Amino acid sequence: MLGRIIWFAWVPFVVAFPLACGDDPHTNPSADGGVNADGSIPPTPAPYGLDTRPANPTCKAPARPQLDTGVKLDAAFGTVRFNQPIDMHVAPGDPTRFYIAERPGAIKSIVRGGTDVSTFYTFPAGTINAAGEGGFLSFAFHPQWPAKKEVYVSYTIGGGSTGMQSIIARVKSSDGVTLDGALETLIQFEQPFTNHDGGNIQFGPDGFLYIGFGDGGSGGDPLKYGQNKDVLFGKMLRIDINTVQAPLAYGIPASNPFVGGGGRPEIYALGLRNPWRWSFDKATGDLWCGDVGQDRFEEVDIIKRGGNYGWSTREAMHCYPSGNTCDTVGLIDPVLEYPRADGKSITGGYVYRGTRLPGLVGKFIFGDYVSGNVWSLDDDGKGTPTKTLLTTMPANTLVSFGQDAEGEVYTVNIGGSISMLAAAAPPPPSTFPEKLSLTGCFDPQNPKKVASGVIPFEPIAQLWSDGATKERYFAIPDGTTIDLAEDGDFLFPKGTVLIKNFDVGGKRVETRLFIRHDDDVWAGYSYEWNDAQTDATLLPSGKTKDVGGQIWQYPSRSQCNNCHSEAANVSLGPELQQLNKDGVYPTTNRLSNQLKTLDHIGMFTKALGKEPADLPKIPDPFGTDAVDGRARAYLHANCSNCHRPKGGGRGDMDLRFSTSFADTKSCNAKAQLDDLGLADAKIVVPGDPASSVLLIRTRSLDVKRMPQIGSAVVDAKGTQVLEDWIKSLTTCP
């Protein structure tokens, strides 16, 4: 569990947020005269869309939210203490009662705010072997409790050549008040050592039972189990407890990565050293894991189906043993690592979804058993994961966290106490607008209309966003102008607000603001529209939602900065080659070239001094130009924010449109991440789309997908352009 204590001993992201979270073709109204089908008048072609620069008195960058991070630990159950508490949960459908696993072999229950403890279950005498890191380790209620009166338990017993075996079993209840059934073993195997047992179990949002096991123990993975797909050690498993596939005592989900062969079918992910504590985010379903390190680093991972997290090839992001070189192909980087100076045995926790600590909403709470530190996983404002110290516990006591039905988070102290994270002081009032109608960028009476100082724009090559239709705008402070980078990227001044509206099925679902605050930090904010379409509410963190049968993903604030890299000059879409096209200006109902209009009203620090025909222009991926240019334009819009020099993408590929194909380092280039089962994985193979990693990833919907965030639907038209282009290639330049 805890790795070595005596008794417990931006993956490169390709989609961008929020301005570049994917744009689909947006059709302008007809300019052929007459009246449109909706009764509107088509725009009139004109030299300029606007005659003068509109004043911007209202759409201004507010101060960044400064939410309270001061946290203290309040006793959850007064002076009540438990016997080596090690895991805690609430039962589905009953938010008032807490259940606490005690390592020697019992489950106790207590009501919220109460002091009376009752026994829910006790293992038969002599069952539990609590040597080393063993004992009663974890439990999980059936997701349909109390209709299905079943609880699943993870524990160790004696026996075998080493004296320790791991067991996952089912226990039933006849009345829902106590567990009175016999232990029904589902999984049982011998542990080679008494440490690194893992043993955490939880049901996922998909209804399957997830099980985490360590690498078998000792130190340094002497049996090389972490990368061995034929054993259950060092893995995250997933099984179906509602079916039986003989000779197993359970079923195998059909989508498990090795169902067709190549490894044990129970395996969901591999390369873990000791995934002692992990959990699912209540809002997004993401599986957050604290994986205990060996000698130098502890790590936080987001576990994906089929993912390989490196152990024992690597310890966190570093080759293992230290000083060696290693093959990192196919390995997924941790979200965060920390050195032994901060702690020596990570205890994974939960993504905070409560209401008592608004500054923590959407942040992963975790800690360290040895140091006693409790942190939140934060972002530095520029996309780099960091950790913020929230509070501390006595050293060598923090064995677990708990989360109640309201999303509040608790610490579990092996010494006997359980505490709830609470505010150390009242949080300061926030001045950041909670409603879109209060931002000053929209009509307060009708937030679907932008304010008078907001200017529309539309790029030529647009980013995919699962079929949504979008509108884009920007607003900069009066008296400021836009600089241009050498490559034509727009360099917006402090105080800029970039806006994007998303419509799905004719309904507005989201509005994103991307703001350059006065402290020079860019930050993204997502507003979720209500069903009445009257206003939108600021989201504190990422979220997924079913929109007309389609899963819509609202990005978290940290995800925004994963793709809006400094290497791409942050704002992404607005650049000379992307805006060199006609656009509609609703306030004048004119159809005019966007660059010419912006230049005419004095938006640029230095006048362009050229006609649109003499300025760079990217092809429309779905236009009539040659397929090579259209495909390269698509890659520029969807991939180049990361895949460019210093952009954070894996390898040295450069997919900017301005880079010659020969210099993209993609043609017949070996893929840095070879997890597709190809004999010789290459990024682009001329004439062979089926062997080209670039195309395969854009058509994948699992851990292999690019982009890995922000999209859950394959872009059929866009990937067809890429396929046609690869087919047209006969050789590499």
Image: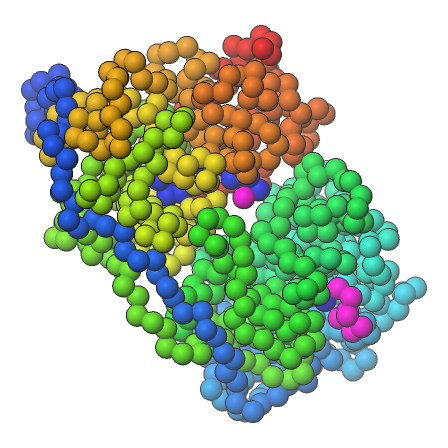
In this rendering, position of residue 461 left or right of residue 61 = right
Judging depth in this view, the residue of 605 and 250 nearest the camera is 605
Q: Residue at x 34, y 72 (%)?
A: 428
Q: Tell me where residue 205 appears, x and y as whole percent.
A: 51, 56
In this rendering, position of residue 172 left or right of residue 494 = right
Q: Which residues are magenta?
A: 3-10
> Can I make out residue 19 in this image?
yes
User: Residue lying furthest top in this view?
Assistant: 730
Give the main secondary structure, helix, strand or loop, of the magenta stretch: loop
Judging depth in this view, the residue of 233 and 51 nearest the camera is 51
Q: Residue at x 76, y 40 (%)?
A: 326
Q: Quadrant of the C terminus?
A: top right
Q: Is residue 4 magenta?
A: yes
Q: Is residue 67 magenta?
A: no
Q: Tell me where residue 82 appears, x and y as whole percent.
A: 64, 85
Q: Residue at x 82, y 55 (%)?
A: 220
Judging depth in this view, the residue of 515 and 145 nearest the camera is 515
In this rendering, the answer to whether 2 lies above or below 420 is above
Q: Quadrant of the N terminus?
A: bottom right
Q: Residue at x 54, y 61 (%)?
A: 387
